[in-house]
Image (spheres, rainbow, N blue to C red):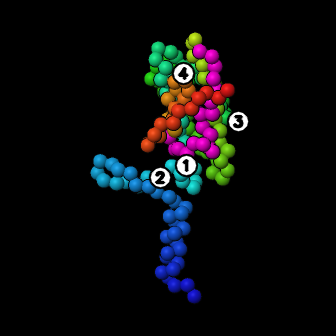
Amino acid sequence: MVSISKLGLLFSLLLTTLFPFQLRGSGSGFVASEAEDSLFPPSKVDVIIINYMAEKDLIFRCQDKHHDLGTQVLSYSEGFTFSFKPNKFVKITLYFCFFTWVGGKGHHFDIYDEDRDDCAECLWKIFETGPCIVRPKFNRCYVWNK
């Protein structure tokens, strides 16, 4: 027969496995926040794209298999945000964008790849050399897809 304490221990272990949390500092102490490498995807993802090309307008069009977000134009330091609900069972959500600007050739990049990106708010800074995602501990820059 299993005792109550063993059941409690198993339940606690299950909860810590299914719902990983990490502690991060705040002005008033520590707060629990969802870890980046959680088992389940966030229920909603916000993708923010910001133009970081000084004196150049960024022209882009993003879409996934079923949704075309249309052509967007951003001046320097302006941003565009879109939101979606990722697939909860299989990591297949993919949004790709085609970027261009005056005097530059066109480039494409997978702005959200559920296999690569594990963020509820994905902030992208777009430079001529490529996009950079802003992370709490570090930024990660990519080269344009060929």
The residues tagged by marks 1 and 2 sit, at their Cα atoms, a distance apart of 9 Å
Vertical comparison of 113 with 13: above or below: above
Other-residue count near label 3 (Cα within 10 Å), few / some / many at <14 / 14–19 / ≥20 = few
Front position in the image: 85 or 144: 144
Circle 3: residue type? Lys
Magenta span includes 106: yes
Residue at image position (50%, 58%) is 20
Q: Which residue is mark 4?
A: 128
Front residue of 78/52: it is: 52
Would you name the residue on which mark 2 appears?
Answer: 34
Return the residue found at the far right.
Answer: 65
- Find the distance from the CA under tag 3 to the CA under tag 1: 20 Å
Q: Alpha-carbon neighbours of circle 4 within 10 Å: few (<14), some, or many (≥20)?
A: some
Q: Residue type at mark 1: give it.
A: Pro
Residue 5 located left or right of residue 104: left
Residue 5's place in the image compared with 109, above or below, is below
How many marks overall? 4
Q: Compare marks 3 and 2 and give the one earlier in the sequence.
A: 2
Q: Earlier in the sequence, mark 4 or mark 2?
A: 2
Check whether the beta carbons of the residues at disc 3 and disc 2 lie within 8 A of each other.
no
**Which residue position is annotated with label 3?**
65
Q: Are marks 3 and 1 in contact (CB under 8 Å)?
A: no
